[in-house]
Image (tube, rainbow, N blue to C red):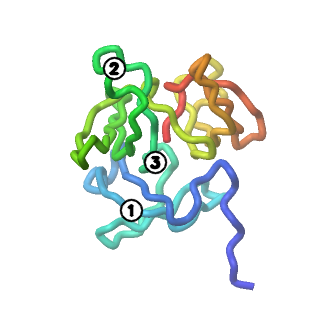
């Protein structure tokens, strides 16, 4: 009694750190950092408590998870390949993550990376984007496995389907 059902596997759990972005009607909230309070299954929205004290009801596409990634496939900066980083934002216009890299001796740096250059961890909740089969675009999913040989994730979608998608077809 009084306990809420757990979020579905494709939804970020309560407590997940996120950044708000892409809001057109309330752009003053873009860039705010917060935590997921809950996922409302009926409205398919997250309630997010921002660090400023606001509680916002947001679509999954308006949130970027602050999650860890592994940098891969950088030809221009090969020394960064294999480095761990933390996604701190996503720029919709360039389709790039801003990633905080923890360097040697504790020095930190931020870098803008294409999504194809960031491997997300198994279990990360994502939104599908840019797929040829448009029926999957906008769907929530979670990463079930990573195939680094083919640069693809196996994701389980909110509709129950499992599909393979390229790294750049998901957004955390």
Q: Is residue 103 above or below residue 166?
A: below
Q: How many marks?
A: 3
* Relative side of 118 to 136, left or right: left
Residue 78, labelled with which disc?
Answer: 2
* Front label number (2 vs 3): 2
Residue toward you, 169 or 85? 85
Residue 61 x, y percent position in the rendering = 48, 43
Callouts 1 and 2 close, C-beta under 8 Å: no
Q: Is residue 73 above or below residue 82?
A: above
Q: Secondary structure at mark 3?
A: loop
Residue drawn at x 69%, y 52% as measured from the top left: 9
Q: Quadrant of residue 4?
A: bottom right
Residue 8's place in the image compared with 160, above or below, is: below
Q: Which residue is mark 1?
A: 34
Q: Which residue is located at x 45 percent, y 31 percent?
A: 118
Residue corresponding to mark 3: 67
Q: Quadrant of the N terminus?
A: bottom right
Q: Earlier in the sequence, mark 3 or mark 1?
A: 1
Q: Which is nearer the N-term, disc 2 or disc 3?
A: 3
């Amino acid at each position: 009694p009084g306990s809420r059902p757990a979020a579905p596997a494709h939804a970020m759990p309560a407590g997940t750190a996120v950044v708000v972005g892409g809001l057109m009607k309330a752009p003053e909230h873009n860039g705010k950092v917060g935590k997921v309070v809950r996922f409302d299954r009926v409205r398919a929205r997250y309630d997010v408590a921002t660090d400023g004290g606001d509680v916002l009801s947001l679509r999954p596409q308006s949130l970027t998870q602050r999650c860890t990634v592994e940098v891969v496939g950088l030809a221009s900066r090969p020394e960064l390949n294999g480095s761990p980083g933390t996604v701190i934002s996503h720029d919709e216009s360039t389709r790039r993550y801003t990633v905080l890299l923890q360097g040697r001796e504790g020095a930190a740096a931020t870098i803008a990376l294409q999504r194809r250059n960031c491997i997300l961890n198994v279990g990360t909740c994502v939104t599908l984007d840019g797929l040829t089969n448009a029926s999957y675009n906008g769907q929530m999913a979670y990463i079930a496995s990573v195939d680094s040989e083919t640069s693809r994730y196996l994701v389980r979608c909110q509709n129950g389907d499992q599909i393979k998608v390229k790294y750049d077809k998901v957004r955390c």
